[in-house]
Amino acid sequence: MMTSLLSAIDKQAEQLTALKALLENELHLISSREPETLMGLLKDKEELLSFIEEQDQSISSLFEKAKANGESTEDAVAAMESCDAIIHECKYLTQINAKSVEQGQLRLTHLRNLMMELRARESMTYDRSGKTTGDAGSKGYTA
């Protein structure tokens, strides 16, 4: 029973390490603005997360059975702590990726606003009294 628990935890550690690598690759794709490749990676990440969830459930039931049989679970607990360390790293990478996406969206909003200002300046004219007037098509709406 204990060997199957330890092998399940080892498999989980491998999956978590693969998730960490995906998150690092995700940051690269976010910064290089490759949306098609990023969408493929997100599907892979979603699939891997479902495998991790299934493995968690398997580990949980194996751990409970080992405890019920009175087996020592110290090795399993130590192995799970190493998985927890990888999970902590994955959470950190996820926060970095979220911040990177947020910064990208802010840059796009800023660029959109600059483009609207530029269009407004280009369409500006003067009336007979010397006052500035904008393009009649813009009607003064701003985003």
Image: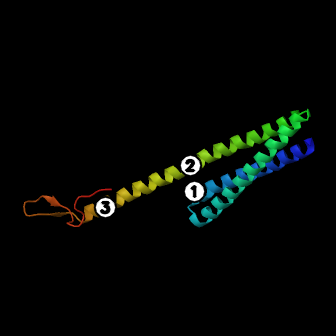
In the rendering, which numbered label is found on residue 98?
2
Name the kind of residue labelled 2 in the image. Answer: Ala
126, 91: nearer the viewer: 91
Mark 2 or 3, closer to the camera: 2
Q: Give the SS element for disc 2.
A: helix
Cα separation between marks 2 and 3: 30 Å
> Where does the image place residue 112, in percent across and percent down from the top left?
38, 59
> Where does the image place residue 117, in percent across and percent down from the top left?
30, 58
Mark 1 sits on what residue? 31
Q: Is residue 25 visible?
A: yes
Q: Give the SS element for disc 3.
A: helix
Pointer 3 and pointer 1: residues touching (CB < 8 Å)? no
Q: Residue 60 occupies which quadrant of the picture?
A: top right
Mark 2 or 1, closer to the camera: 2
Cα separation between marks 2 and 1: 12 Å
The residue carrying pointer 2 sits among few (fewer than 14), some (14 to 19) or many (20 or more) residues within 10 Å by Cα, namely some
In the rendering, which numbered label is found on residue 118?
3
Name the kind of residue labelled 3 in the image. Answer: Leu
> What colour scheme has been applied to the protein in the rendered image?
rainbow
Q: Is residue 96 left or right of residue 90?
A: left
Rendered-image quadrant of the C terminus: bottom left
What residue is rendered at 87% in x and 34% in y?
A: 67
Query: Mark 3 or mark 1: which comes first in sequence?
Result: 1
In the rendering, which numbered label is found on residue 137?
none
> Where does the image place residue 141, in percent across and percent down from the top left?
26, 58
Q: Is residue 21 visible?
A: no
Q: Residue 3 occupies which quadrant of the picture?
A: top right
Q: Give the SS element for disc 1.
A: helix
Rendered-image quadrant of the N terminus: top right
